[in-house]
Amino acid sequence: MTDKVPVHPTAGVKIFGRSASAQAYAMRDFLQRCDIPFEWIELKNDEQGREIGIDGVNDPRLPVCLFSDGTRLENPTIRQITEKLGWFRNPSYSEYDLAIYGAGPAGLSAAVYGASEGLKTVVVERWALGGQAASSPRIENYLGFPAGISGAELAERARDQACKFGAEILLGREGLRGEFSNGKSVGILADGTKLVARTAICAIGIQYRRLGLPNEDKFTGVGIYYGAGASEASFCLNEEILLVGGGNSAGQAALHFAKVARKVTMIVRGDALRDTLSAYLIERIYSTPNIEVLTNTEVTAVNGDEYLTSITITNRRTGESKAIETRRLFVCIGGQPHTDWAVEVGVARDEAGYLITGPDLQADGKWHAKWPLDRSPYYLETNIPGLFAAGDVRHNSIKRCASAVGEGAMAVAFAHRYLTNG
Ligand SMILES: Cc1cc2nc3c(=O)[nH]c(=O)nc-3n(C[C@H](O)[C@H](O)[C@H](O)COP(=O)(O)OP(=O)(O)OC[C@H]3O[C@@H](n4cnc5c(N)ncnc54)[C@H](O)[C@@H]3O)c2cc1C
């Protein structure tokens, strides 16, 4: 079974909306991550709204999506867009050999290896393909791509490969919780669908960490953007961009924005970039004239009414604060796992919420109290036999694309062993 994207409706999606629209941002972000070309048309006045058949810039039918086959969707949900792209589907089978939760690099890799090795494989993804990697404008340290590759393109290639081998990908579906009994896993999805599988891999990665400031939620998608903001770069022509974070993802984003923006300011809590950034990025950042790095600095307030208009930054050494006017702040300060569901079903986690697997379930020569079998857990197996964890969600993982991909492939090998030997 293949799941090839129909090409025609995707070529040139146009999104019409007003500037301060979180929904329009969600659509741009989704399409960018799915590697689908789109055009963003910001409506400046009511007259422009009437030209596309609505009453004006405050019409609740905005944002409007126009597909090249003439289809028009008014204020659509991401699920409606997924349906339009032909990507929304129901599971084909009542039971699978392997269910994978998360379609980032780890989940997609598990899908390729699982399906290619003959396992009836399903992947559940709550948003778009590619996970964090899909928000990266250019991944340069992934084996085999010396000139780099955008995360969205890498994910699209992986999707194609997984589907070629017969994996089913259920996009726009969120795994809420799981039940594990009698050698079966039952995943309960947010829409009520139940997925039964003989073995499962949790590859749900991490979610962007937030600044934790008052008003932050209000500006999400209307001035504050998480991740490298790949979908927004082309709209920042000649603007001054502010970016929080000193890690590799922030460094990549700074270099990407610097190509179009007048100036990029990196706001970094630590003393120096060298503590947090790969050498190849440090060199480039310091040799790019329109990037400024403010160390020992943090964002202490975000301000505005309908959308972000300024932020306040504070020097951590001197305590001095100042306001900077801006309409866009990109936040790249890493992430944290969202694994509350694991507590309910008794999956062992570390203090930060990462899932504990394999040898890490052992302490002082004894297996974790929740490990139920006489045999040792397989590497990447959680304390629930037959449930594996791969990629960033796993305790002690490396937080790189290549390691997530490697763990996805390894988890399938151990899933096979579990299916054969128990
Ligand atoms: C901007 C940026 C740039 C980066 N650049 C590089 C780089 O150049 N080189 C490098 O090696 N690494 C890079 N990384 C790190 C790399 O992207 C991650 O280590 C990698 O994506 C981890 O893969 P993963 O599959 O474990 O998790 P993720 O990529 O986090 O994917 C997890 C997926 O699971 C989905 N999900 C979560 N919860 C659920 C649920 N309940 N139900 C269904 N689906 C769910 C999410 O939507 C997501 O798609 C970068 C990260 C970022 C953010």
Image: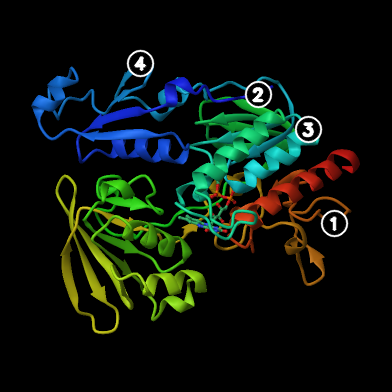
Q: Position of residue 27 (x, y in %)?
A: 36, 35
Query: Which secondary structure, mark 1?
Result: loop
Q: At which x and y percent is residue 85?
A: 47, 23
- Determine whether, in the image, residue 104 is placed left or right of residue 83: right
**Residue 184 appears anywhere in the view:** no
- Where residue 211 sits, quadrant-wise, is bottom left
Q: Earlier in the sequence, mark 1 or mark 2?
A: 2
In the rendered image, the vertical position of residue 289 relative to residue 421, given as above or below: below
**Could you give the CA–CA distance between mark 1 and mark 2, rounded to whole angstroms?**
37 Å
Spatial separation of the CA atoms under disc 3 and disc 1: 24 Å
Q: Which residue is mark 1?
A: 376
Pointers 4 and 3 in contact (CB under 8 A)?
no
Task: Indicate the amino acid at tag 4.
Answer: Thr
Cα–Cα span, label 1 and label 4: 55 Å
Instruction: Tell me the mark number nearer the camera, choosing from 2 and 3.
Output: 2
Please give the residue where the numbered disc 3 appears in the rendered image.
119
Q: Please give the residue where the numbered disc 4 appears in the rendered image.
A: 71
Q: Residues within 10 Å of mark 1 (few under 14, many from 20)?
A: some
Q: Which mark is residue 2?
A: 2
**Sequence-wise first label, 2 or 3:** 2
Answer yes or no: is residue 99 visible: yes
Q: Secondary structure at mark 4?
A: loop
Q: Which of 60 and 130 lies nearest the eye of the viewer?
A: 130
**Considering depth in this image, is 178 or 128 the residue closer to the camera?**
128
Image location (x, y in percent) of residue 53: 18, 17
Three-letter amino acid code of the residue under disc 3: Leu
Front residue of this view, candidates 197 and 222: 222
Indicate whether 377 appears above or below 53.
Answer: below
